[in-house]
Amino acid sequence: MKSITQFSIYCFLIFIITLSTVSAQSPKKTSGNPIFEGWYADPEAVILNKEYWVFPTFSAKYKDQIFFDAFSSKDLVNWKKHPRILDTTAIKWAKMAMWAPSILQKGKQFFLFFSANDIQSSERKGFGANNPDKDDKVGGIGIAVASKPEGPYKDYLGKPLINQFYNKAQPIDQAVFQDKDGQYYIIYGGWGHCNIAKLKPDFSGLMPLENGEMVKEITPKGYVEGPIMFMRKGKYYLMWSEGGWTNGTYKVAYGVADSVWGPFEKKSTILMADEKVATGAGHHSVINTPKSDDWYIVYHRRPIPNLDRDHRVVCVDHLYFNEDGTIKDVKMTFEGVEPKKLK
């Protein structure tokens, strides 16, 4: 009897171990949200070398934001971390507050645009770290370059690309957009002002506009920060964040125009807090899988309960359009999205 009992226990343990092993090896059915561990924000989601990539801000105190991590995936579900692809040891003028990367590939090189140092203007007296009576100039929007998406990156210009407060916009939260004629534009701006400028072909600076100005303001109603631009069916979509990034009021709105220059009148708010899921949803990017009308929105949000200003996580959900081209409200989920491999 004893031997039979021991044999039964042995068989039961083998069954449990086998079941656990099979469960551990079973592929994930969805990405889940957040899509990877850690406190991150302001995700730039793109397709590079037939893989999905996310380049986020490390969400922490400004003094600790001295590097960028990146994440790659072949299917939107399983993500690989690439730590410290860029840090302040490579960007000598950057000391803190490295935010909101934006990346593009041109030829065999990858250009990573970012902002650093949270520079302040004299109009916001009392905020400036260098001298409250003068504009901070050591910081703004910079560019790093590498031969692979995961780096290592090095400083491209040796100085900021933009370190002035054109139209009272803080030089942060840059997005880079290539129009159908091949021209590259940079869209950026904090403090409630959004600017657009032409980039030189080699990204060494801005090209003066026809009126001699370096930038044009295209700020839509309600705009705060975090702009992105994309095209769909011949229309230009400008999306941005509203509310306060430090709390649950953060949200995403958009406008549509026939030109990269606008005007972009606000259509609606399409991503906002959901007391059943999360708050503070915003500062996003979008992915359109090639040769399809499948779209995804990659964004950060605040878990409930939210215990710290910098507790933000990166998530992905579907982005759907109506027949008339307007964007449907985004439904935040814990499940995320299904696997989608690139061909």
Image (tube, rainbow, N blue to C red):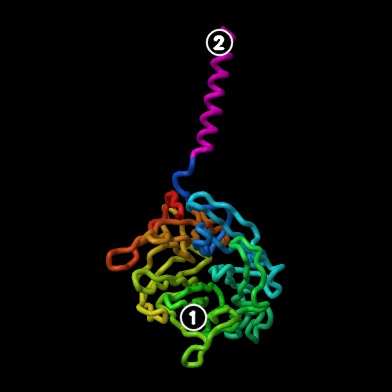
Q: Residue at coordinates 35% horizontally, 73% vertically from top-left? A: 234
Q: Residue at coordinates 51% horizontally, 90% vertically from top-left? A: 213
Q: Secondary structure at mark 2?
A: helix
In the rendered image, the residue lying farthest to the top is 1
Above or below, 206 against 87 in this view is below
At label 1, the amino acid type is Asn
Instruction: State whether the magenta stretch is mostly helix, strand or loop.
Output: helix
Which of 276 and 236 lies nearest the eye of the viewer?
Answer: 236
Quarter holding residue 128: bottom right
Above or below, 82 against 92 in this view is above
10 Å crowding of disc 2: few (<14), some (14-19), many (20+) = few
Residue span colored magenta = 1-26
Ranked by sequence position, the earlier of labels 2 and 1 is: 2
At label 2, the amino acid type is Ile
In the rendered image, is residue 316 in sight? yes
- Residue 203 x/y as whole percent: 57, 78
Q: Secondary structure at mark 1?
A: strand
10 Å crowding of disc 1: few (<14), some (14-19), many (20+) = many
- Residue 142 x/y as whole percent: 61, 75
- In the picture of the structure, the residue carrying the numbered disc 2 is 4
